[in-house]
Image (cartoon, rainbow, N blue to C red):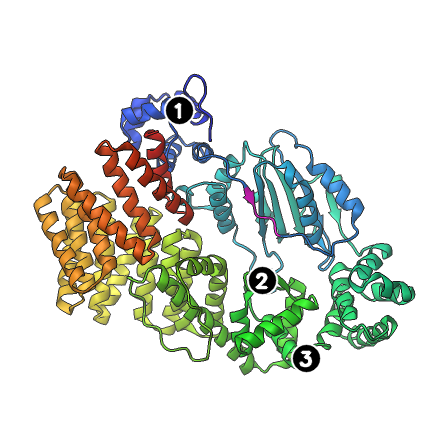
């Protein structure tokens, strides 16, 4: 926790005081500018931890370039990061490089400069393996943990990681609330540097494309260390000569050591000349050495020399086709590939068509058109010969070079229509699993109609926790599948995939993939000429813009969606777009306008007989009246909504309304009635497994208990709410933490 000093101040308060003096502003003037009361700011001045929202407003008004947001994040307590993937179990050699790089990273850098080491070299040279081994060897010296990202600078599909999105992921991992992360690369980079200013974090930036991709991800703190890998020397980044290592082929002794470790010392000792020849045929490159060694190990009854002769024959076959200096690596790939069964070889080459960072068994089964059990056996076979790598949680990944080779084999051996068919099956798998997972996360929401799958795809039986975890791990692949759908002309899937991800994106506030995927979805719907889909995706995009406080863009998208829906005669869609416009009015404190839009939506829902929509609209109308202090009309509308939801057995809608009714009773000083509403909503939401809903209800109940003087009960309620919001990455966590600190 950020320490409160003896004089009662804090680093945040001190920096705020300094900035106020610099700009000639008083604390009272600051109160006017940011909309917080002088008494509240007095608590901050004397060391109370700020909320993320207060810090954001102060940072914006005082032009602090993220410094105040960073100090507010630090006030939440240290965040211990542990993002490093496991180091390779068969790592050998590179002792001099390992010693040199570990030594450099064991000391702090010059003021304002992190300790930075760079590893470059050709593909297959073992850059990532060395980087991870170095990082693990010094991890204990970085007390605040490690950040890791694969920047995918040389991914076969030519789509490196978007730096904006990487910064968003890093900042949330570092404890910055998602709703205060600014838009724009420069602003995010400034905030990132500010957050790391007083921390000791090791940052591993793997597979960088160029210095332009790298620069925003570099800390400016002497306490941080950075490990960079790339296939080329990054001239735009300042790296001292002794901190830049170019990896080439391994020394012969290291190569034979690696082979012996996999093949077995006794067998290797019996044929030393053949082992040396094998190392030579592999070009002494670690990736090729590991695959070749596994090929030898899986043929224990063949002599090593016989297998080397096979490899030599394969090399002669490929030499005439070689167009670059990776012939040794491709020879080993080809040698091992030709040793696979027909089904395993087909699985391998089809995986090369998948553009995502990893692949799950179900997606691989869909690609190959195989039953799940059979697909898992084939993947285990490919893992056993080091053509793919197991990641746990039923996931696998493939080295970029292997993916290029696999895709080449797919192009050579699979007809165009079969490749497209495989990708259609995979897109279908992602589409139906995305819908299934997101339905579990928020079953009360309506989704676009999803047709029956065109193929037999395995759809998981999700519960809440497994659905959330699946979405967390697969979001980047869903984005890749969306792009794939557009590329192969599956434009309906191209808009339904992002639309089907909405519940997860809304729950976890994943702004960057939310906006990016839905912008692709809009394009896809337009290509399909699907105006219904275009309206749906625009409406979802508007929700993201609204929560990002991009109010004008939100209103514009809601309005476009509404106009499309009017043209289509989609009355239900019109009502939901009107609801969105009403929420924008709420955000602008134009509660009378909001009430009018909610009322218009209510009329439409009643006209078309959509009782769920009618109930939601009634609850929103009631909430608008509450904000206008028209409590009689508020209670009447909310009680109508409650009765309607009970009549149609919509328990989610009932809880949605009970919380709003509880807030209204609270403002009317009817504490007993308010607590009863909150308790009923809480019990039902727990029963439904609605984690976010439980957190919201606990938060509202805690506020009422604070006002009623029940401090112990309030603390208990707020602590549980904080735990849930923090787990879900919801920005309300900061508000609840502030309440907890205020109330001891």
Residue 616 spot, x, y in % from top left: 20, 57
Q: Classify mark 1: residues with Cα within 10 Å, few (<14), some (14-19) or many (20+).
A: many
Q: Between disc 2 and disc 1, whose residue precedes?
A: 1
Could one spot residue 445 in this view of the protein?
A: yes
According to the picture, the residue beneath numbered tag 1 turns out to be 47
Q: Does the rendering let one see residue 590?
A: no
| Residue 515 lies within the magenta run | no
- Looking at the image, which is closer to me, 151 or 71? 71
Q: Earlier in the sequence, mark 1 or mark 3?
A: 1
Classify 571 as above or below 219. below
| SS of the residue under disc 2 | loop
Label 2 to label 3, Cα distance in Å? 30 Å
Circle 3: element type: loop
Q: Residue at x 63, y 51 (%)?
A: 206
Relative side of 302 to 560, left or right: right
Residue at (27% x, 57% y) in the render:
558
| Quarter of the view holding residue 323 | bottom right
**What residue sits right under mark 3 in the picture?**
341
> Is residue 701 rendered to the left or right of residue 138?
left
Side (left or right) of 503 relative to 4:
left
Q: Which residue, as the protein is rendered here, is positioned at the far top?
A: 7
Is 318 located above or below residue 326 in the figure?
below
Which span is picked out in magenta? 81-85
Q: How many angstroms separate mark 1 from mark 3 (CA)?
A: 68 Å
């Amino acid at each position: 926790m950020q320490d409160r000093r003896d004089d009662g101040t804090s680093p945040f308060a001190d920096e705020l005081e300094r900035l106020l003096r610099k700009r000639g502003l008083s604390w009272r003037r600051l109160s006017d500018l940011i909309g917080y009361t002088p008494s509240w700011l007095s608590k901050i001045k004397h060391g109370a931890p700020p909320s993320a929202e207060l810090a954001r407003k102060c940072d914006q008004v005082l032009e602090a370039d993220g410094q105040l947001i960073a100090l507010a994040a630090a006030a939440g307590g240290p965040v211990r990061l542990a993002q490093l993937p496991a180091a390779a179990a068969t790592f050998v050699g590179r002792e001099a490089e390992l010693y040199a790089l570990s030594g450099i990273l064991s000391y702090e850098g010059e003021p304002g400069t992190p300790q930075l080491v760079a590893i470059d070299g050709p593909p297959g040279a073992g850059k990532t393996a060395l980087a991870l081994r170095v990082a693990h060897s010094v991890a204990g010296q970085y007390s605040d943990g490690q950040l890791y990202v694969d920047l995918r600078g040389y991914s076969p599909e030519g789509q490196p990681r978007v730096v904006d999105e990487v910064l968003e992921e890093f900042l949330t991992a570092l404890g910055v609330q998602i709703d205060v992360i600014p838009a724009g690369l420069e602003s995010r980079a400034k905030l990132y540097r500010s957050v790391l200013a007083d921390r000791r974090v090791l940052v591993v930036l793997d597979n960088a494309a160029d210095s332009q991709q790298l620069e925003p991800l570099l800390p400016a703190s002497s306490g941080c260390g950075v490990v960079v890998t790339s296939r080329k020397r990054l001239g735009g980044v300042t790296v001292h000569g002794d901190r830049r290592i170019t990896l080439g082929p391994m020394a012969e002794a290291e190569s034979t050591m690696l082979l012996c470790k996999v093949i077995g010392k006794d067998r290797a000792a019996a044929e030393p000349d053949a082992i040396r020849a094998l190392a030579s045929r592999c070009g002494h490159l670690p990736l090729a050495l590991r695959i070749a060694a596994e090929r030898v190990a899986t043929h224990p009854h063949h002599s090593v020399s016989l297998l080397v002769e096979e490899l030599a024959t394969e090399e002669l076959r490929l030499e005439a086709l070689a167009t670059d200096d990776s012939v040794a690596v491709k020879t080993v790939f080809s040698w091992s590939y030709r040793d696979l069964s027909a089904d395993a070889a087909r699985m391998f080459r089809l995986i090369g068509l998948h553009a995502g960072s990893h692949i799950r068994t179900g997606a691989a089964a869909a690609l190959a058109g195989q039953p799940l059990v059979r697909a898992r056996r084939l993947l285990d076979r490919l893992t056993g010969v080091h053509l793919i790598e197991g990641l746990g949680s039923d996931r696998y990944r493939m080295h970029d070079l292997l993916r290029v080779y696999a895709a080449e084999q797919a192009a050579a051996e699979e007809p165009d229509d079969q490749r497209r068919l495989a990708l259609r099956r995979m897109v279908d798998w992602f589409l139906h699993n995305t819908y299934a997972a997101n339905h579990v996360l928020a079953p009360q929401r309506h989704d676009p109609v999803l047709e029956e799958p065109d193929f037999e795809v395995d759809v998981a039986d999700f519960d809440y926790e497994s659905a959330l975890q699946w979405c967390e791990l697969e979001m980047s692949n869903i984005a890749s599948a969306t792009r794939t759908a557009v590329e192969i002309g599956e434009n309906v899937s191209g808009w339904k995939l992002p639309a089907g991800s909405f519940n997860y994106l809304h729950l976890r506030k994943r702004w960057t993939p939310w906006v990016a995927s839905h912008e692709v979805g809009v394009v896809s719907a337009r290509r399909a000429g699907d105006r219904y889909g275009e309206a749906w995706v625009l409406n979802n995009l508007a929700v993201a813009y609204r929560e990002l406080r991009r109010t004008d863009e939100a209103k514009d998208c809601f309005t476009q969606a509404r106009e499309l829906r009017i043209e289509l005669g989609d009355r239900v869609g019109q009502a939901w777009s009107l609801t969105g416009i009403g929420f924008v009015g709420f955000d602008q404190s134009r509660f009378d306008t909001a009430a009018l839009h909610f009322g218009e939506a209510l009329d439409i829902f009643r006209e078309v007989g959509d009782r769920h929509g009618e109930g939601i609209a009634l609850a929103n109308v009631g909430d608008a009246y509450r904000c206008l202090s028209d409590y009689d009309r508020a209670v009447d509308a909310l009680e109508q909504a409650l009765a309607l939801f009970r009549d149609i057995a919509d328990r989610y809608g009932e809880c949605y309304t009970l919380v709003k009714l509880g807030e209204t009773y609270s403002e009317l000083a009817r504490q007993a009635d308010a607590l009863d509403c909150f308790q009923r909503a809480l019990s039902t939401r727990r029963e439904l497994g609605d984690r976010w809903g439980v957190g919201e209800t606990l938060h509202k109940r805690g506020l009422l208990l604070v006002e009623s003087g029940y401090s112990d009960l309030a603390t208990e309620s707020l602590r549980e709410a904080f735990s849930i919001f923090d787990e879900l990455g919801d920005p309300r966590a900061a508000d609840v933490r502030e309440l907890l600190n205020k109330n001891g």
